[in-house]
């Protein structure tokens, strides 16, 4: 796989705001969580693919762990909202999914794979003040961080 360019949003940066359509039927705006909850943005390539399904299902299965740590998990893909709604239903997901169909958020965070026109698997952990505390982009989209990996980073926020 070709070397990936690093995301343009790095730890210490103020997280670029985003407003994306959600499988809940509304729009989710990142800044709405400011001073309320930490946020984990989890960009994933495409719904209904094996690694993405494994990852998103783990977000759903471990939903209570994330919520217990005061973290809102926002999985984001470039799939259209109707596709994401079908995906959520097919796997009985607790977590809402966000559609970056126009690739605005993926470009703002520097994770859009322009050649394939989907996002590289990337994570941005944002604290309650809206500051990016941790960033990780997988070297290969066929792997993902485990809940334990993510909790290790989240625990650093709650020290």
Image (cartoon, grey):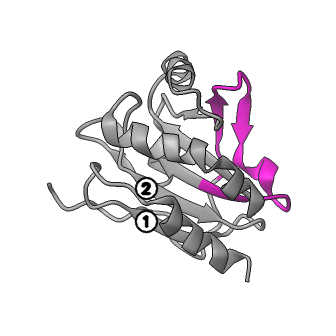
Tell me the magenta residue range.
Answer: 17-40
In contact (CB < 8 Å): disc 1 and disc 2: yes
Residue lying farthest to the right in this orientation: 35
Q: Secondary structure at mark 2?
A: strand
Dot 1, how many residues are within 10 Å of its Cα: few (below 14), some (14-19), or many (20+)?
some
Q: Where does the image place residue 95, in percent across and percent down from the top left?
A: 64, 38
Q: Where does the image place residue 27, in percent across and percent down from the top left?
A: 72, 30
Q: Where does the image place residue 6, in percent across and percent down from the top left?
A: 35, 65
- Residue 18 is a magenta residue: yes
Taking depth in this image into account, of 141 and 126 the one nearest to the observer is 141
Residue located 45% across and 60% down the image: 146
Residue located 47% across and 47% down the image: 43
- Residue 126 is a magenta residue: no
Query: Looking at the rendering, which quadrant does residue 12 occupy?
Result: bottom right
What residue would you read off at disc 2?
A: 122
Viewport quadrant of the C terminus: bottom right
User: Where residue 136 is drawn, which disc sits there?
Assistant: 1
Asked whether the viewer can see residue 110, the reply is no
Dot 2, how many residues are within 10 Å of its Cα: few (below 14), some (14-19), or many (20+)?
many
Residue located 68% across and 57% down the image: 65
Taking depth in this image into account, of 113 and 126 the one nearest to the observer is 126
Residue located 56% across and 26% down the image: 88
Q: Where does the image place residue 135, in percent across and percent down from the top left?
A: 49, 67
């Amino acid at each position: 796989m070709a070397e990936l360019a690093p995301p343009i949003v790095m730890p210490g940066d103020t997280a670029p705001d985003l407003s994306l359509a959600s499988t809940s039927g509304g729009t989710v705006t990142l800044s709405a969580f400011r001073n309320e909850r930490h946020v984990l943005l989890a960009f994933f390539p495409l719904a209904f693919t094996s690694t993405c399904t494994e990852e998103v299902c783990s977000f759903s299965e471990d939903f209570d762990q994330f919520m217990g740590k005061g973290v809102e998990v926002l999985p984001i893909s470039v799939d259209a909202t109707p596709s994401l709604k079908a995906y959520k239903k097919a796997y009985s997901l607790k977590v809402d999914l966000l559609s970056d169909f126009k690739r605005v958020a993926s470009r703002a965070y520097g994770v859009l794979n322009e050649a394939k026109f989907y996002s590289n698997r990337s994570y941005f952990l944002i604290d309650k003040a809206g500051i990016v505390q941790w960033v990780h982009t997988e070297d290969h989209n066929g792997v993902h961080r485990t809940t334990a990996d993510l909790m290790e980073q989240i625990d650093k926020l709650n020290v």
